[in-house]
Image: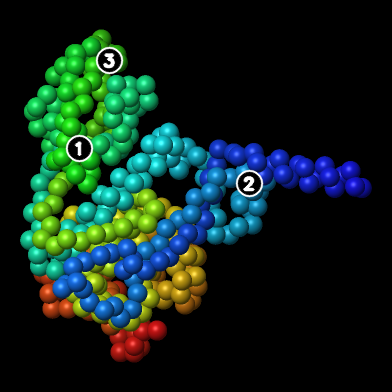
Amino acid sequence: MLVLVLVIVVGMVVANRVTLSYYALVPGRAQPVAGLITVPAAHDHRLHGTILLTDVGVEQVTALQYLPDRLWRTATTVVPTSDLTGGLPASEFALQGTVDMEESQLTAEAVALRQMGYAVPEADVGVVLYAIIPGTPAYRSLAVGDVVTAVDGVPVRSPSDLVAAIRAHRPGQQVTLSVGTVTSPTRTHPVTLRLSGQRQGSTVEPILGIPYSQLPGSSGMGTQAVYDFPLHVTLSADGIGGPSAGLAFTLGLLDRLSGGELTGGRIVAATGTIDPTGAVGEIGGLPQKTVAVERAHATVFLVPAAQVAQAQAHATSGLTVLGVTSLQQALSDLRRLGGHLGAAGNGPPAGPTGHAVPAEWQSAPWS
């Protein structure tokens, strides 16, 4: 019997050290987004209520954890590594998450300030790189998050501009790129590369190393905008990657700048991407995020409209899930729930109207 016990113990120790090509998505943190936002003191306000930003924990699965994660941990989703990373090397996947977060913060700041009535001019200044093919010229000299603003001194403002500039050369020729970053796209340095080639039918196509054969719709690059912000605002990522905090950052910044009454005093969680028009997009890990916001005692959860069912399937009766397609719809819902923006924050109405909410919420204070 002692031998059997020892064999089982040793087997469990070994199994816990053997990692599989799977990751477990687990409930992450739900934290006040206000703690990640810094605004000028003259424009700041005391907050009456809380807006939560939530994320997803990602754990590599061991042989010992695989069956419990799949069968018994109800708030856990096990996914193949390739599904999570999209086939990117681990280093590129991590960088892509950082780039997505930086982009979402810039967009959230622009959308929030425009809602406040500020003019926030923007211009397309280059092409941001989201993926680079291993073994190519770009892989050796560029990184995910780099922004290409010119090829041989000729400005490129979009992925199609960059593709055309590369295709104007032949395999073996050199090109010099002007390269910046997402946060400083116009502060560039030169990168000189010798193009390789790949066969396309009867011709050989020059290749830099960024996936662009499927344009439009390639995940390898995107247009990079630069904004002229009228206020100095700082948004901290706190180690979180990805674009799904866009809506929470937008609402949190509006709350800080407009009077602190946006939630009406309640704990409101929000998740969803945000684009420059204020449209809210879908995100991943919603079941895990729903559990996280419940644990943080939120009573309202704003989620992308197309994903309401996912959140409701994991919500208890104490959490009201509202699906939104835009910032304007989110603000309309919050107004119906007793919250409001200060006078400066009531920009021009647009977008879908809000949802019907319980009558008692429209008059009673939130708790």
- Find disc 2 in the rendering and name its residue: 66
- Find disc 1 in the rendering and name its residue: 180
From what the image shows, is residue 263 above or below residue 118?
Answer: below
Q: Position of residue 168 (x, y in %)?
A: 14, 19
Between 255 and 290, the residue placed more toward the observer is 255
Q: Position of residue 116 (x, y in %)?
A: 14, 69
- Find disc 3 in the rendering and name its residue: 197
**CB atoms at circles 1 and 3 under 8 Å apart?**
no
Q: Quadrant of the C terminus?
A: bottom left
Q: Spatial distance from mark 2 to mark 1, Cα to Cα?
A: 42 Å
Residue type at mark 3: give it: Gly
The numbered mark, 2 or 1, whose residue comes first in the sequence reads 2
In the image, taking residue 154 as reference, residue 359 lies left or right, namely: right
Q: Secondary structure at mark 2?
A: helix
Residues packed near mark 1 inside 10 Å, few (<14), some (14 to 19) or many (20 plus): many
The numbered mark, 2 or 3, whose residue comes first in the sequence reads 2
Q: Position of residue 131 (x, y in %)?
A: 32, 34
Residue located at (43% from left, 65% from top): 30
Residue located at (53% from left, 49% from top): 59
Residue type at mark 2: give it: Tyr
Outermost right residue: 1
Q: Secondary structure at mark 1?
A: strand
From what the image shows, is residue 87 above or below residue 302?
Answer: above
Question: In this rendering, which labeled residue sits more in front, label 1 or label 3?
Answer: 1
In the image, taking residue 309 as reference, residue 234 lies left or right, namely: left
Between 20 and 327, the residue placed more toward the observer is 20
Res 205 seen here: no
Residues packed near mark 2 inside 10 Å, few (<14), some (14 to 19) or many (20 plus): some
